[in-house]
């Protein structure tokens, strides 16, 4: 146990906290433009799926370089519909990462397929193409890579594996709105790419998401599936240009975005690159302020072929250098007034997946090591430079106090 270099005790040990006002993890930056657009939508009399959803879809397709963008009420819905549109079902296998949110694998279960995990690279935390190649079997139908924390996966290598085995690639780009690989925007590379607009994402609509594709027939199927399998949406039926009639072409789902959500997204998208520059500044402040701490490892440097979306700044605690575990470190951060998160616990060791497939610790060592020690620090366009410095000060103080 060591007193921090500045002579201050952590708040959890009786010292004074870094902040009096709590810094919420992942708080979004909402501007007056979004507020005015939401009010305009409320006054318009049309708050469900309608013209503002279509406006967001068109703008996002242009931003991502995709031919089509289909909005949905969550990225989970987008992944589910993508699997269905790809024809994946019972008896099929989908290769994905064990270091992700459970939604990524749950949707594979929802369509009756089997998630097959491939370990991640120890530095990038993204699914390792070599492990993907080893996991391919005659039942494999798709690869679902997830761009962890906003760092793009090696899409050249993944694309080559997919082509050689005739597999569909469905990118989980929940963290990766601004990301690109070798100059190609995420969203314009694979047959399906699914983005999240959840409350803490780089582009938020509170809840929501979007699927991009180059295939017009696929886009039409996604649009039909997101609204009960109907041949046309409510806006097409009930606007002044609509016919009012409809037919169910197949049993679909209630996965539509609303104009209230899209009202936020329209202006979030307009500022997405500006907000990225803010997060890049905070990222550099974290890199510089936390460099050399024996208690933790910081994110690997960005490679030339990567455009990193800077969604999550994750550090991995080194248990051999600390006298406490992650939960106590998180509690100490909270006592200093700093919010944080865990991204992610390993999916294959969740009770459902252990019970169904019999996974045991040790099968995916890189994912398990990262998952055991990862902590996500605040990273948002709403952060000020002082906020970022407070985070650095709090982490350094706690790491020094609990140094082994």
Image (cartoon, helix red, strand yellow):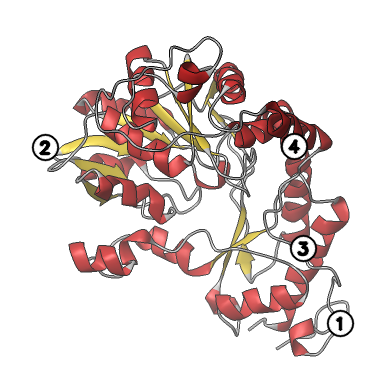
Q: Residues within 10 Å of mark 4 (few under 14, many from 20)?
A: some
Label 2 residue SS: loop
Q: Is residue 47 above or below residue 132?
A: above
User: Where does residue 308 sit, x and y in percent of width and height?
Assistant: 60, 37
Say if mark 1 contacts mark 2, CB within 8 Å: no
Q: Which mark is residue 138?
A: 2
Give the Cα separation between the discs numbered 3 and 1.
16 Å
User: Where does residue 14 sit, x and y in percent of width and height?
Assistant: 80, 90
Q: Which residue is mark 1?
A: 16
> Would you say residue 399 is visible in this rendering?
no
Q: Which mark is residue 23?
A: 3
Q: Which mark is residue 308?
A: none
Query: Mark 4 against mark 2, which lies toward the viewer?
Result: 4
Towards the viewer: 128 or 24: 24
Q: Residues within 10 Å of mark 2 (few under 14, many from 20)?
A: few
Sequence-earlier tag: 4 or 3: 3
Say if mark 4 contacts mark 3, CB within 8 Å: no
**Quadrant position of the C terminus in the picture:** bottom right
Query: Mark 3 against mark 1, which lies toward the viewer?
Result: 3
Q: Which residue is mark 4?
A: 275
Sequence-earlier tag: 4 or 2: 2
């Amino acid at each position: 146990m060591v007193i921090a270099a500045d002579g201050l005790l952590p708040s959890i040990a009786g010292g004074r906290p870094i902040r009096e006002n709590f810094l919420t993890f992942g708080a979004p930056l909402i501007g007056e433009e979004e507020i005015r657009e939401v009010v305009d939508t409320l006054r318009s009399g049309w708050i469900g799926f309608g013209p503002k959803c279509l406006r967001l879809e068109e703008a996002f397709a242009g931003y991502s370089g995709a031919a089509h963008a289909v909005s949905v009420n969550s990225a989970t819905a987008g992944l589910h519909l993508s699997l269905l549109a790809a024809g994946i079902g019972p008896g099929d296998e989908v290769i994905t990462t064990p270091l992700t949110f459970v939604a990524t694998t749950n949707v594979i279960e929802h369509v009756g397929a089997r998630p097959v995990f491939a370990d991640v690279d120890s530095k990038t935390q993204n699914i390792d193409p070599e492990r993907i190649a080893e996991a391919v079997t005659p039942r494999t139908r798709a690869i679902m890579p997830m761009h962890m924390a906003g760092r793009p996966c090696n899409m050249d290598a993944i694309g080559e594996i997919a082509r050689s085995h005739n597999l569909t690639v469905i990118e989980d780009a929940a963290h990766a709105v601004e990301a690109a690989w070798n100059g190609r925007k995420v969203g314009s590379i694979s047959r399906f790419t699914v983005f999240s607009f959840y409350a803490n994402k780089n582009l938020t609509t509170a809840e929501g998401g979007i699927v991009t594709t180059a295939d017009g027939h696929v886009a039409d199927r996604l649009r039909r599936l997101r609204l009960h399998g109907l041949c046309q949406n409510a806006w097409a039926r009930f606007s002044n240009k609509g016919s009012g009639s409809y037919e169910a072409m197949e049993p679909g789902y209630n996965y539509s975005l609303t104009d209230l959500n899209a009202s936020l997204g329209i202006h979030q998208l307009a500022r997405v690159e500006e907000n990225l520059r803010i997060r890049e500044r905070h990222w550099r402040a974290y890199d510089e302020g936390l460099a050399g701490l024996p208690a933790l490892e910081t994110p690997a440097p960005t490679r030339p072929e990567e455009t990193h979306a800077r969604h999550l700044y994750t550090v991995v605690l080194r248990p051999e250098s600390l006298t406490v575990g992650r939960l106590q470190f998180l509690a100490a951060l909270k006592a200093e007034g700093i919010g944080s998160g865990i991204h992610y616990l390993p999916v294959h060791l969740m009770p459902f997946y252990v019970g169904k497939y019999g996974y045991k610790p040790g099968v995916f060592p890189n994912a398990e090591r990262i998952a055991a020690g990862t902590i996500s620090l605040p990273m948002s366009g709403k952060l000020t430079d002082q906020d970022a410095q407070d985070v650095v000060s709090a982490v350094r103080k706690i790491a020094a106090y609990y140094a082994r």
